Image (cartoon, rainbow, N blue to C red):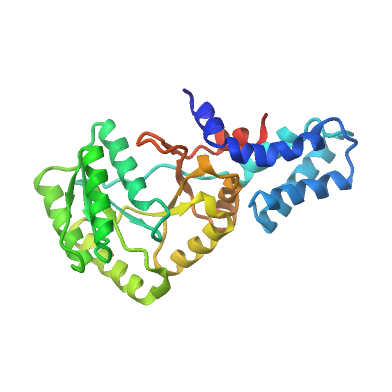
Amino acid sequence: MGIFDKFKRGLEKSRDAVFGKLTGLFQGRKLDDSVFDELEEILIAADVGVDTAVWLVGRVKQAAWRERLVDTVRLPNLLQMAMEEALAGVDSRMRTAETGPSLYLIVGVNGVGKTTTIGKLARRYRDQGKRVILAAADTFRAAAIDQLVIWGERAGCDVVRHGPGADPAAVVYDAIMAARSRSMDVILCDTAGRLHNKGNLMAELAKIQKVASRELPGAPHEVLLVLDGTTGQNALNQAKAFQEVVSVSGIALTKLDGTAKGGVILPIVREYGIPVKWVGLGEDIEDLEIFDPAAFSAAVCQP
């Protein structure tokens, strides 16, 4: 299955929410301001957000005027091009270490699919022939450690862990030492997500980053924020909150196959300037895809 087909299948609910409502709008209606007003309302309802919806409609309107359009038949293509423009510059590539293992911090609140995403990433890297080790640095919850061990078993990766309440930075340190001694390529570090107490979280992540950068030049090579696509605009609030705590370098948006709110990708990229690097398009361990702006835009806008 090609990347467009995967996105089209995974974004079916989002496409129905947007294109399903736009079908009547696009079927040969006379092009006037009422059409653009309806388009803006539909995009806002699809969790694109007010600012980004206004920007998108403005780009569509400009293109329609340039082409001297008199009806709405071309609007799906113009909307697709506007979405691609909004997502222009997205670099989905994960940064890697020049030498030694690459260390990735995975952050996010509990319940967004953080541990699942780590397991899927581990499997993906393993399938690429890379040697992967996991660090259970969310020591605040015993369940988080147990869940990571289960996903580690599924992905075929060892998990470095301490007991509940242990120092998360010590877990990361041990994972780095283990990765070096075993010639690992990738270290995936789970972290706690206690946003209700930003002070503790900030101190914890700062200590982890200090240890990582001391032991591995350039580490952490990515700070990947996991967001739940089903929460729509609340994902924006989480992105803003985590940006205040740690320098987020990329987003993994989960559960897009189960929501009509996939439009939230657009304001995350356009308004916060954070590249979306991964999207979850299914429940299986293989259903984590590198984000493709063109495939996303086409999957949402085309029938």
Give the residue furthest to the left: 181
Q: Position of residue 59 (x, y in %)?
A: 74, 46
Residue drawn where x is 17% and y is 43% of the image: 184
Q: In the depicted view, which residue is nearer to us: 164 or 176?
A: 164
The structure residue drawn at horizontal position 37% and vertical position 76%, both measured from the top left corner, is 199
Residue 234 shown left or right of residue 51 in the figure: left
Is residue 132 found left or right of 75 in the rendered image? left
Would residue 219 be visible to someone looking at this image? no
**Image side of residue 19 versus residue 162, left or right:** right
| Vertical placement of residue 227 versus 211, above or below | above
Q: Residue at x 74, y 40 (%)?
A: 21
Task: Give the image location of residue 156, x and y in percent.
Answer: 21, 37
Camera-nearest residue between 183 and 33: 33
Q: Residue furthest top?
A: 1
Residue 12 is drawn in which quadrant? top right
Give percent across and percent down for residue 47. 63, 52
Quadrant for the C terminus, please. Answer: top right
| Towards the viewer: 155 or 242 | 155
Residue 154 % position (x, y): 25, 38
Whether residue 136 is visible here, answered yes or no, is: yes
- Number of numbered callouts drawn: 0
